[in-house]
Amino acid sequence: MADLPKFVKISEEGPREGFQIEKGNIPTQRKIELIEALSGTGLKHIQIVSFVNPKRVPGMADAEDVVRGFKPKAGVKYTALWLNEKGLERAKTHTDKLTLEGKISIYASEKFSTRNNNRNTEQEFEYSRRVLENYLENGIPVKRGSVAAAFGCNYQGDMPVARIVDIVSRIFDLADEYDVKLEELSFADTMAWATPLQIKQLLGAVREKWPTQRFGLHLHDTRGMGIANAMAGLEMGVDMFDACVAGLGGCPFAAHKGAAGNVCTEDLVFMCNEMGIETGIDLDKMIECAQLAEEIVGHPLPGSVKMGGNLAKLRAAAAA
């Protein structure tokens, strides 16, 4: 077990990951309202849209309108997601507001990759090679490697640690081939199969082979393990997390029967605060954003701290 980090970087994905799975139409202006509110919380990175096929993901049909409409805040990095070259070309038309960041991303589950991206694992690596060349030709920095469905898959079952280690090796080999240094390595629990033990086993195996590598986690809370898995990650020295305000989110192709939300941003911030770990995020403002998100989607969202409140306020009231 590693020392706990002193500072944790939290990347907010609620506007993208959350709104892509919501049923029914959410007005563009309301999406912009949440993005701009999140911009005032101290977050330094917000992923705001996906440039994907609107027939498959109707919630992202207004991606261009969202990007054109929101007002960026100085010091905050805004990014987007894409799954193919067409999506990348769309993103490249918005460099006035979006920061384009490339990554080498591979799905551990071949069946899910085929379902989500219409590519098997070998085709994923072929695509990654092609898109990596595109990034480099266009001056788009590539600093991150990523393994999706790293802990298990609703279509393929558990992911053996040895398979993940092999995929990571191939990611680094590809990066080395193009003289690209990957500063970050992220593991996504895309379908919420992870438990704290699995988090520690996988990160332990990867760290044994790459002891100086910086790790990130993208966690889902479908089975209520999100914050427990984040704690396990902290204990393994992870200092980068993707999270979603109020616990929004989920992949529309993951075949979830229950709530599919991501680990909740304000819950994660609260836990870090209580452990003396800095995040740079104002928890009270984050709670207000969570309440706004719940109002926008029109139904209860799974985050807990937006209901229970900030203990710092209760402590202050008790002391008075």
Image (cartoon, rainbow, N blue to C red):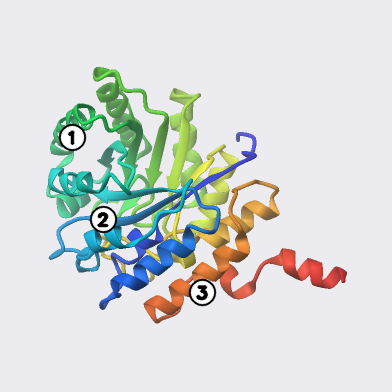
Residue at left offset 59%, top offset 48%: 279
- Depth check: give the residue in front, 100 or 123: 100
Give x and y (percent) for residue 124. Answer: 17, 38
Q: Within 10 Å of the Cα at label 2, are there few (<14), some (14-19), or many (20+) other Cα atoms?
A: many
Q: Marks 3/1: CA distance?
A: 38 Å
Direction from residue 3 to residue 246 in the image, left or right: left
Which residue is identified by label 3? 291
Q: Is residue 184 left or right of residue 233?
A: left
Please indicate, yes or no, whether residue 101 appears anywhere in the rendered image: yes
Residue holding disc 1 = 131
**As drawn, is 185 to the left or to the right of 107?**
right
Quadrant location, the N terminus: top right
**Three-letter residue code for mark 1:** Val
Q: Amino acid at mark 3?
A: Gln
The residue at which mark 2 appears reads as 50
Relative to 258, is 43 above or below?
Answer: above
Disc 2, SS? strand
Number of marks in picture: 3
* Residue 107 found in image quarter: top left
| Disc 3 secondary structure class | helix
